[in-house]
Image (cartoon, rainbow, N blue to C red):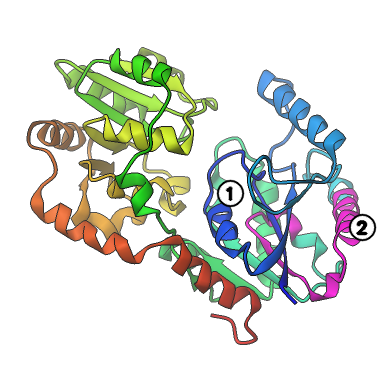
Amino acid sequence: MPERLIVFSDDWGRHPSSCQYLVRQLLGRCEVTWINTIGTRRPRWNWSTVRRGLEKLGDWRAGAAGARGVPGPELRNPKMWPGFHRPWFRRLNAHLLARCLQASCPSLEDAVVLSTLPIVADLIGVVPVRRWVYYCVDDLSAWPGLDGEMLREMEQLLVERADRLVAAGENLASRLRAKGREPTVITHGVDVSHWSCPPAVTAGRRRTWSEIPRPRVLFWGLLDRRLDVAWLDALGHALPEGSLILVGPVQNPDPALSRVPRVYQPGRFTVEELSWAAAHSDVLIMPYADLPVTRAMQPLKLKEYLATGKPVVVRRLPAVEEWVDCLDAAETAEAFVQRVWARLQSGIPAEQRIARQRLAAEDWASKAEAMARVLFDAEGA
């Protein structure tokens, strides 16, 4: 009989995530149910909340389904109260989630639950499953726009109650050790062939991209308060020509971003389009601010950037230390600008290209095998 896996994480297919990459690798050996949830943000009366609410209402009407258009897990969209910050909100959501699991997952006692979200903490001891595994991929309590106090409290409970813990990097492992538990560290993987051999894109996308002046300095990801707009502004003013391209959804960034010169914001790209965009850019950047949330994070894009073969310039943060010989890391805006300009002039150094060869050992299949040992083996990883 195949193993039974239940996953609580960001909505399947909404944004790329390490949990989705791992689960895709595990689909051949597991029956997977993926639970799409809400509640990490406090509801506010703004367009973003309304749009997200309409999305969830549509999901609730659709009910259970398979993954959208591609092989994937069974999806569940339980009706939930949009928040956990009051005790009765938590009790209600625990009841709703428990009812969803009991109704949709046969042989629940044999299932393993994997969660990247602390909001499942109240289910442990209520829903009888084989094992609870917390996969820590970020410090969500410090994430811009999330309900930090609630997430901090529920994560502490989850760390105490979960059977096993996994951290996506040593910086996140240190957080969990400070809470009294020892995790297994499984760093993010990368599909080197995808990022080094980009697929074709539509003629419209090629035409739009060709109109963006070169040299092209590219960032992709969520455009929010984690970006250091002062660094971007310094770079935009320093470039004598060319473009500073910011690809991705916009989520309440610093208003000063709109005043940075040479910025192009072409919106969201698919994973295929991102690979193509990198191949047709000159330098890739990660200009994150030095904040608690950025010191705790493990950006999925870091190894993807490196796999493209392009020069990479980043802020020096804990997540990049293991790969600092493969890129340029800056600690000041001036150094950041200088390194970007140097890479525009000379390209990637030979020693960085050689150092990146170890990306070959970072494939998602090997990461998924390590995760499977934590999930299903009696002794864990």
Q: Residues within 10 Å of mark 2 (few under 14, many from 20)?
A: few
Q: CA distance from mark 2 to mark 1?
A: 29 Å
Q: Earlier in the sequence, mark 2 or mark 1?
A: 2
Please indicate whether residue 288 sits to the left or right of residue 94 in the image: left
Q: Where does label 2 land, which residue?
A: 103
Q: Amino acid at mark 1?
A: Leu
Q: Amino acid at mark 2?
A: Ala
Please indicate whether residue 273 sits to the left or right of residue 53 in the image: left
In-front residue for pair 78/123: 78
Where in the figure is residue 106, as x and y percent of width and height? Answer: 87, 66
Q: Where does label 1 land, which residue?
A: 140
Question: Is residue 92 located in the magenta-colored stretch of the structure?
Answer: yes
Q: Residues within 10 Å of mark 1 (few under 14, many from 20)?
A: many
Where in the figure is residue 376, as x and y percent of width and height? Answer: 65, 77
- Residue name at image x 23 percent, y 45 percent: 309
In-front residue for pair 172/4: 4
Residue 257 in view of the camera: no
Q: In the image, which residues are magenta? A: 91-120
